[in-house]
Amino acid sequence: KAGVTQTPRYLIKTRGQQVTLSCSPISGHRSVSWYQQTPGQGLQFLFEYFSETQRNKGNFPGRFSGRQFSNSRSEMNVSTLELGDSALYLCASSPRVGQGNNEQFFGPGTRLTVL
Amino acid sequence: AQKVTQAQTEISVVEKEDVTLDCVYETRDTTYYLFWYKQPPSGELVFLIRRNSFDEQNEISGRYSWNFQKSTSSFNFTITASQVVDSAVYFCALSEAMGGSQGNLIFGKGTKLSVKP
């Protein structure tokens, strides 16, 4: 089985621009979660999608949004980029919606640099 | 509030040494799950283990072992006879069954392990 894939792997943007990141979960997995990783804040939960519905959202401003398609692929969008948005964005998939015990399989991440 | 603390920011050992990575967690839930993930330089988080709050039995997998103690809210990870390939950042994480973070992973800040030949 192919693992979680994320595209692009690297991205450079300037302040004020917007960006869209893509995640394809493991085949058969219906839950997709997004995490932001920065040196200062560490790994922080962004949101989780299941069956095209946002199920949970972390403590991030509205500039961060996402969606999930019927094939479980997910995208996240960041509008009006700020320097502090520079981070590694990790996507994780899980076979079921969380009751806490689901093992999440992570992709390689997208490294976003905002100049 | 939910929280995971990994007090050790960086650890450096020489190959074949044993090393223990500490993890302390906070949660109000009675049902929760604890995880360890490994992040090599490539960036991808690799799942190592999951334990639920009702199972305090320690686990051993090859050179890896985990010590779960509810009394001290700790879930420590020991690597026996460390190898250079163990060099990575290790994250402890918590997920609650019913709390506000249901289904989401709350990560510690990670411990960077360097194993020197």
Image (cartoon, coloured by chain):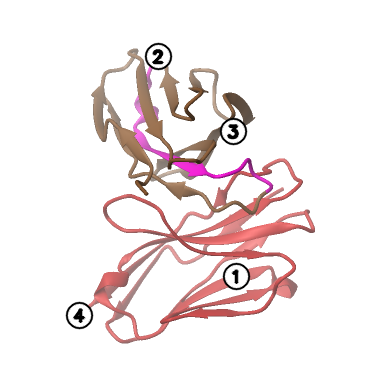
The reply to whether the C-beta atoms of the residues labelled 4 and 1 are less than 8 Å apart is: no
Q: Amino acid at mark 2?
A: Thr
Residue B94, above or below B116: above
Q: Residue at left 34%, top 26%?
A: A83
B102 within the magenta span: no
How much space separates mark 3 and mark 1, taking CA atoms?
25 Å
Judging by the rendered image, the residue that carries numbered circle 3 is A58
Instruction: Specify the segment rendered in magenta.
Output: A80-99
Mark 4 or mark 1: whose residue is earlier in sequence: 1
Which label belongs to residue B24? none
How much space separates mark 4 and mark 3, taking CA atoms?
41 Å
Q: Amino acid at mark 3?
A: Gly
For this rendering, which residue is in front, A86 or B7?
Answer: A86
Judging by the rendered image, the residue that carries numbered circle 1 is B75
The reply to whether the C-beta atoms of the residues labelled 4 and 2 are less than 8 Å apart is: no
Q: Any idea which chain is the brown one in this picture?
A: A
Is the same chain shared between marks 4 and 1? yes
- Chain containing mark 1: B
Tell which tag, 1 or 2, sits nearer the viewer: 1
- Chain containing mark 3: A
The reply to whether the C-beta atoms of the residues labelled 3 and 2 are less than 8 Å apart is: no
- Chain containing mark 4: B
Judging by the rendered image, the residue that carries numbered circle 4 is B117
